[in-house]
Image: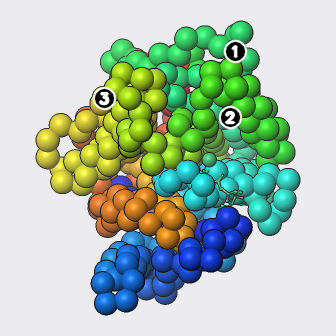
Amino acid sequence: MASVKVCVRLRPLNRREKASTSNHIPVVTTNTSQSSVTIVKGLGAKSVQHNYSVDQVFGSFSEQEEVFTNAVLPVVTQVLQGYESTVFAYGQTGTGKTYTMEGDVTSEQHMGVIPRSCLEIFSKLAKQDKYVASKVSCSYLEIYNEELSDLLVDETTNKKLRVCTTSKGSGGRVVCMGLSSRTVTSAQEVIDVLNEARERRQIGETKMNKQSSRSHCLFTLQVESTEVVEGGQIERIGKLHLVDLAGSECAKSTGASAGSSRMRESQNINKSLLTLGRVISTLKNGNGRVPYRDSKLTRLLQEALGGRCKTLIIATLSPSILSIEESLSTMSYAEQAHGQCVKGGGGGGGGGCSGGGCRRAIGLTTKLFVPFFFF
Ligand code: ADP
Ligand code: MG
């Protein structure tokens, strides 16, 4: 059994929200000790209070360090033990998804989940003498309009990426064919990779007139380690997928004319975010076909959502009345995923783990083959 954990992070009011005299009172409040969120809609006697409860709540003054240590660190620790885990940032554009996932990589205080996870992984691998060998590699994929692009290579060398399932003999795994992988040896190298990818993404945005809020970004770290134990060695392969999802408001098609490219974008975003929600709930209920194949996002993460994996969703919110409808919608998505215990199996490719553990390459002097272009 794997679990889905849902956190909510509220950001502070921004300058624009504060500047508006009628809008400067927060309509979203958090209770960290009770892990609850309250959204008040309307004024006075006509106001309606919506209460939600999730696994963890971070208030508007929460620090990056606090979010990482309390919500993400347990997931990273499991990756070092050979688990495959995913952290999603879900929410409306401007609510802090990228701040939470990436943040300011040059600042110790403001760096987000990706640089912190790397620092943690490299420091653990360096500190523990039990590891005789280790290798960390990363890949960075953007999904825009159901099309994939590799953020680690230039457009000219960007091969057509394809999602496919390997033959049964090769493990029957879902892979992203053509996706490059970069070996990294320090957190600084990962930060360099992030900066490079950000530039590449910005160039692509200008060229294609697209907005970053309309694509999903999947950063994956693969951690391979070899530990010496009495009588042999244990090799583990853990994976950490860190996903900055497209803005949830982009799933709405309001304002876009039928057949327009904006409408197509919206439909694709809608499909992938809804499919992600459905995959989680189908796995939880343990019945019916798990609709992984209904979107590229869920198909790519097929093996990371389910039996042997941990999933963390960080839903981000603005406290402002200007975003109240989006906040209500984000909280209903978060609440749906909350508390759901995902049952194993469910159509995922390839075996390897069972029961509560996600250790993949367990067994003395066992080697586990993992295709190079994995996801
Ligand atoms: P998103 O990726 O969801 O569109 P961003 O991460 O880009 O949103 O955040 C929008 C703005 O709000 C950025 O300027 C960011 O620095 C700021 N911000 C977001 N979350 C926080 C937070 N928790 N504390 C302080 N500033 C934040
Ligand atoms: Mg963003």
Q: Which residue is drawn at 44% across and 66% down?
A: 324
Q: Where is residue 375 in the image (x, y as percent from the top left)?
A: 51, 31
User: Outermost residue toward the left?
Assistant: 288
Q: How crowded is mark 2: few (under 14 residues within 10 Å), some or many (20 or more)?
A: some
Q: Give the residue pinned by disc 1.
A: 155
Q: Give the residue pinned by disc 2.
A: 137
Q: What is the number of the mark on residue 293? A: 3
Q: Which amino acid does label 2 sit on?
A: Ser
Q: Which amino acid does label 3 sit on?
A: Arg
| Res 205 seen here | yes
Mark 1: which secondary structure?
helix
Q: Where is residue 209 in the image (x, y as percent from the top left)?
A: 62, 25
Instruction: Give the label, 3 or 2, closer to the camera.
Output: 3
Mark 2: which secondary structure?
strand
* Front residue of 23 and 373: 23
Q: Do the residues labelled 1 and 2 touch (CB within 8 Å)?
A: no
Instruction: Give the label, 1 or 2, closer to the camera.
Output: 1
Query: Which badge, 1 or 2, comes first in the chain's sequence?
Result: 2
Mark 3: which secondary structure?
helix
Q: Which residue is drawn at 45% across and 48% down?
A: 249
Quarter of the image for residue 141 reads top right
Q: Are marks 3 and 2 in contact (CB under 8 Å)?
A: no
Query: Which badge, 3 or 2, comes first in the chain's sequence?
Result: 2
Quarter of the image for residue 96 reads bottom right
Looking at the image, residue 320 lies above or below residue 291: below
